[in-house]
Amino acid sequence: MPSETKEALREAPAPAMDDTRPVSQPKASLRVLLVEDDANDAELVIRALQDAGFETTHQVADTREAFTLQIHKAPYDVILADYSLPQWQGLESIDVLREQGLDIPVILVTGSLGEVRAVECIKRGAADYVLKDHLTRLPLIVRSALEERRLRQEHRRAQEELLRSNRDLEQFAYVASHDLQEPLRMVAIFTQMLAERFRGKLDEESERYMGFVVEGATRMQGMIEDLLTFSRLGRGGIQRAAIDCEEVLRKALGNLAGAIQESGATVSHQPLPVVVADAALLLQLLQNLIGNAIKFRSAEPPKIDVSACQEAHEWVFAVRDNGIGISPEYAESIFVIFRRLHTRQEYPGNGLGLAICKKVVEQHGGRIWVESQPGEGSTFKFSLPRHPSASESEGDRGEEA
Ligand code: ADP
């Protein structure tokens, strides 16, 4: 819950007990684990909840050991923890829950708590806090903590579902492209043989049709191969190591030497960092972006610049060109597999390069996007999280830059 909301809750006039219990609502059952050493306080807390319409069942734990044992005995809805107990800090219940992988909201119920300490508690993971002499607010706070948890769980479920369906799709793409290769190879070979055999023997229209069949089969072969390459990318995990991006750039430029020479491109770069990444995938990423910067050039010879800047938690790389540019309305769709803005006659390609870039970046936990306007060149940017184990070398290079 945003802190403003919490403040608003706190500043709102305390509702009368009956206000919090709409007459028509059935009683909500609530399993409470109290971290409390004072039986009277425990009773007051439970009564405040019952008066507001909760049907409570509760247990009490007043040491870390008892708490750790108890949380596995029942599926608790909420932990109400006294801030400081003689033998334990109630706030530590948050650490225990985290260690045990349990998502149960912890609300601190305390005699007094300064503003600074309250903020600390929320930062550490408490859902909220309530003062013992303002227990009328407890039911509201409990309801909103339960709602927050419901939303968190829904979000987690949606994410898991998305992950699962992505894995299924990838598996499907892999199997389909792999298994389609062989029959398609047959179609392509035999249509080519037929075309050879009937060359000059068919009427003009049939020759033309035959040309379409051969071309279509060859193109489909290319696409299936690309799809297979795409779904194989990073299959079985990525091989992370500390790698020097300047070295990777040198290799990419070496691989693109022909295109660079033929187009008269100049490629400059700023000092690039050492990052923890998969060297082969990063090479493919830079090579695709620079290759596109050359391919989608304007009438001018391509001018390309590669740079990286260090942000709080990530490196943001930029590959800038002076090419034809892209209209902002296509800024997202160009990263989708097989999505192209031009015909093959205008620019060769299958529309896979940027989809590969996106997959590589996302496998490393980063993002990729483009900033561009038609006729004004494009800047493709991607982020790579800075890895703690490589922070020293990254920092060194960052200062050089
Ligand atoms: P392909 O290069 O095979 O077309 P990509 O996935 O690499 O496939 O690119 C998708 C589309 O994005 C391209 O067809 C092109 O329209 C656009 N695009 C990519 N890079 C650039 C660039 N540097 N400048 C202008 N347009 C680009």
Image: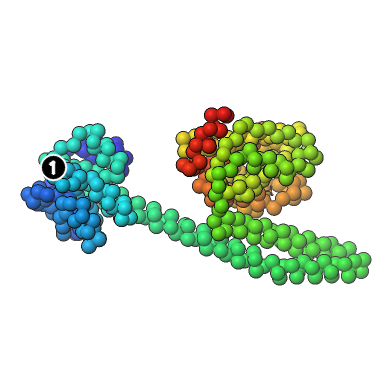
Q: Count of labels shown? A: 1
Question: For mark 1, does the 10 Å Cα neighbourhood hold few (<14), some (14 to 19), or many (20 or more) residues?
Answer: some
Q: Residue at x 64, y 64 (%)?
A: 177
Q: Estimate the x, y position of residue 115 in percent, counting from the top left.
A: 22, 33
Q: Is 314 rendered above or below residue 239?
A: above
Dividing the picture into quadrants, the one containing residue 67 is bottom left
Label 1 CB-ligand 1 distance < 8 A? no
Q: Estimate the x, y position of residue 395 in percent, counting from the top left.
A: 51, 34
Q: Estimate the x, y position of residue 290 in percent, counting from the top left.
A: 68, 41
The C terminus - image quarter: top right
Q: Farthest residue to the left: give it.
A: 40
Q: Is residue 44 visible?
A: no
Q: Estimate the x, y position of residue 179 in percent, counting from the top left.
A: 65, 69
Q: Nearer the viewer, residue 250 or 110?
A: 250
**Which element type, helix, strand or loop, lies under badge 1?**
helix
Dividing the picture into quadrants, the one containing residue 159 is bottom left
Q: Residue at x 21, y 38 (%)?
A: 10
Q: Farthest residue to the right: give it.
A: 200
Q: Quadrant of ligand 1?
A: top right
Amino acid at dot 1: Lys
The N terminus - image quarter: top left
Q: Nearer the viewer, residue 265 or 146?
A: 265
Q: Is residue 204 visible?
A: yes
Residue annotated with mark 1? 132
Q: Residue at x 62, y 56 (%)?
A: 230
**Colouring of the image:** rainbow
Q: Residue at x 65, y 66 (%)?
A: 178
